[in-house]
């Protein structure tokens, strides 16, 4: 990823946005390898949550995103606010979301049942 960041910088990029949640684990390494700004999407999410005064947010994504402590710990590290991160508790729901992302979201073919399921899971979190 560092090499890719350097190639982007050498190619004339003015900044880099890391939109993949998992790649945020190497954010610091990428940031220190280039002289252009590297935008951290999780930082922007946390900033928005704090500004809006949200106390609870749902974290929905791939199994890695939902279960890896990196995301929860990053989003809850704030001196300005206590934020509770909610993830689906049922392993079956987490697996369903993961499957939807890989089999429907990536292909832009989201079925009605998938929409129903994701709305049900979100409602159960609230």
Image: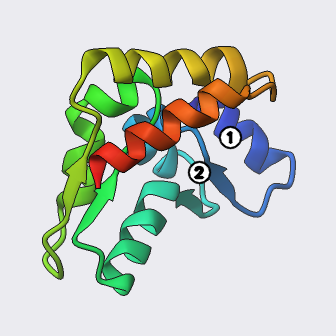
The answer to whether 41 appears left or right of 85 in the picture is right
Q: Position of residue 51 (x, y in %)?
A: 37, 85
Task: Quadrant for residue 92, please give it.
Answer: top left
Q: Position of residue 3 (x, y in %)?
A: 64, 29
In the depicted structure, whether residue 72 falls above or below residue 82: above
In the depicted structure, whether residue 51 falls above or below residue 21: below
Task: Quadrant for residue 88, please give it.
Answer: top left
Q: Is residue 65 visible?
A: yes
The answer to whether 96 appears left or right of 64 in the picture is right
The answer to whether 71 appears left or right of 28 in the picture is left
Q: Is residue 29 visible?
A: no
**What's the residue at 81%, 29% (across, down)?**
108
Q: CA distance from mark 2 to mark 1?
A: 6 Å
Q: Which part of the image, by quadrant, shows the C terminus? A: bottom left
Task: Quadrant for residue 106, please give it.
Answer: top right
Seen from the viewer's position, the closer of residues 32 and 20 is 20
Tag count in the figure?
Answer: 2
**What's the residue at 26%, 52% (across, down)?**
74
Q: Position of residue 123 (x, y in %)?
A: 38, 49
Q: Is the Cβ of the residue at disc 2 closer than 8 Å to that at disc 1?
A: yes
Q: Earlier in the sequence, mark 2 or mark 1?
A: 1
- How packed mark 2 is, by other alpha carbons closer than 10 Å (few <14, some 14-19, many 20 or more), is some
Marking on residue 6 = 1
**What's the residue at 23%, 52% (across, down)?**
85
Marking on residue 34 = 2
Seen from the viewer's position, the closer of residues 86 and 28 is 86
* Helix, strand or loop status at disc 1: helix
* Helix, strand or loop status at disc 2: loop
């Amino acid at each position: 990823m560092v090499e890719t960041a350097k190639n982007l910088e050498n190619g004339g990029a003015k900044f880099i946005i890391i939109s993949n949640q998992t790649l945020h684990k190497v954010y610091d390494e990428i940031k220190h390898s280039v002289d252009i700004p590297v935008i951290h999407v999780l930082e922007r999410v946390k900033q928005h949550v704090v500004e809006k005064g949200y106390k609870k947010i749902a974290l929905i994504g791939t199994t890695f995103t939902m279960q890896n402590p990196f995301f929860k710990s990053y989003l809850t590290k704030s001196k300005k606010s206590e934020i509770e991160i909610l993830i689906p508790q049922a392993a079956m729901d987490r697996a369903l979301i993961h499957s939807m992302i890989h089999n429907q979201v990536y292909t832009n073919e989201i079925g009605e049942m998938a929409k129903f399921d994701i709305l049900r899971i979100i409602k159960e979190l609230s």
